[in-house]
Amino acid sequence: MAQLASVNKVKHVKKRRGVAYRLAKQWDIQLMVVPALVLIFIFSYIPMYGVLMAFQDYSIFDGFWASPWVGFKHFNMFFHSPEFWPIIRNTIIISLLKFCIGFPAPIFLALLLNEVRHMVFKRVVQTVSYLPHFLSWVIVAGFAMSILSTDNGSLNILLQKLHLIKEPIGFLGKAEYFWSILVTTNVWKEIGFGSIVYLAAIAGINPSLYEAAAMDGAGRIKQLFMITLPSIMPVISIFMILAIGNLLSAGFEDILLLGSNPVLRDVANVIDTYVYRVGITNQRFSYATAVGLFKAVISVGLLAFANSFARRSGNSLW
């Protein structure tokens, strides 16, 4: 028993020395990581003391240490607020719509582009699909509002020309259209940029696998399901875990801009916009911090759950 403990101790020492040796040997590469770590520490870890406001009646004049502690008062206020369930409902529905439609969309586009053999056409499609990602939401929202406008909006003009409607429809003034518009705009903006990672993963697949499958008589569709999708499944799993972890992040800029009409408040009010309106507009800093902390805790729980579920297939983050 003592001999076994001694052997384990030696292995542990060697392992520690091995890690230290590799770090010392790669000092120039490790040095490149230092600025990123410093930025993360300054802008992500140091501000975390701000969560103390969730347990205080925070006053900007008294500061963190002089403001009175109130425990879970603000959490209870949020849970018993009449806006709690509508906000949670809107957040979950919008998040699920973005996840169910927006997550597979880049994968589908990457698979389609992989089948294109005309390189000029393929590059043009890639460039056109990437461009919206680099536009700010202010521009995208303005573009969407222009298309959907009742005054010379191109969509209303098209529908009238096709005799599908008689009068222009105020799409951004009707609650029943808001979620569809929001999800469609998000997919249009991010589908091209999101497909880059999947195209890179597909490019890394060994071509001999396709050659062997073709010799066995497998067509393009069968190769897609038997080779392409299984080969990129680790990448898909990682992005799915991250997407599930962000399931309560229904969006902020897109909803705030596209849902600016007060008529849409019942379907456009989510956790992020609620925190902004309560915390910044009404200056209820402690209450808004409590709501944000509630969302963060649930998101961490979802991330851990998704990771543990993905671990069964060997594609987990940790």
Image: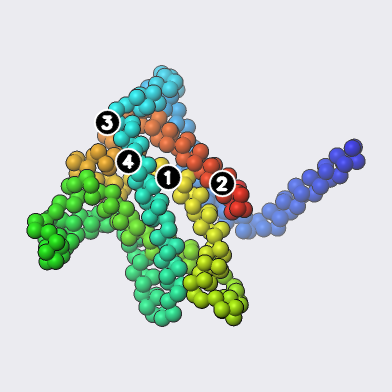
Say if mark 3 contacts mark 4, CB within 8 Å. no
- From the image, tell me which residue sits under label 2: 309
- From the image, tell me which residue sits under label 4: 90
Q: Quadrant of residue 12?
A: top right
How far apart, in angstroms, are the residues tagged by discs 4 and 1?
12 Å
Under circle 2, the secondary element is helix
Q: Position of residue 47 (x, y in %)?
A: 46, 37
Depth-wise, is mark 2 or mark 3 nearer the camera?
Answer: 2
Q: Amino acid at mark 4?
A: Asn
Residue under the point 56% across and 79% down: 217
How far apart, in angstroms, are the residues tagged by discs 2 and 3?
41 Å
- From the image, tell me which residue sits under label 3: 282
Under circle 1, the secondary element is loop
Depth-wise, is mark 3 or mark 4 nearer the camera?
Answer: 4
Figure quadrant of the N terminus? top right
Q: Which mark is residue 80?
A: none
Depth-wise, is mark 3 or mark 1 nearer the camera?
Answer: 1
> Mark 1 packing: few (<14 Cα in 10 Å), some, or many (20+)?
many
Residue under the point 36% across and 75% down: 124
Residue 73 horizontal side relative to residue 177, left or right: right
Depth-wise, is mark 2 or mark 1 nearer the camera?
Answer: 2
How far apart, in angstroms, are the residues tagged by discs 2 and 1?
16 Å
Tell which circle, 3 or 4, labels the residue nearer the N-terminal end.
4
> Farthest left residue?
166
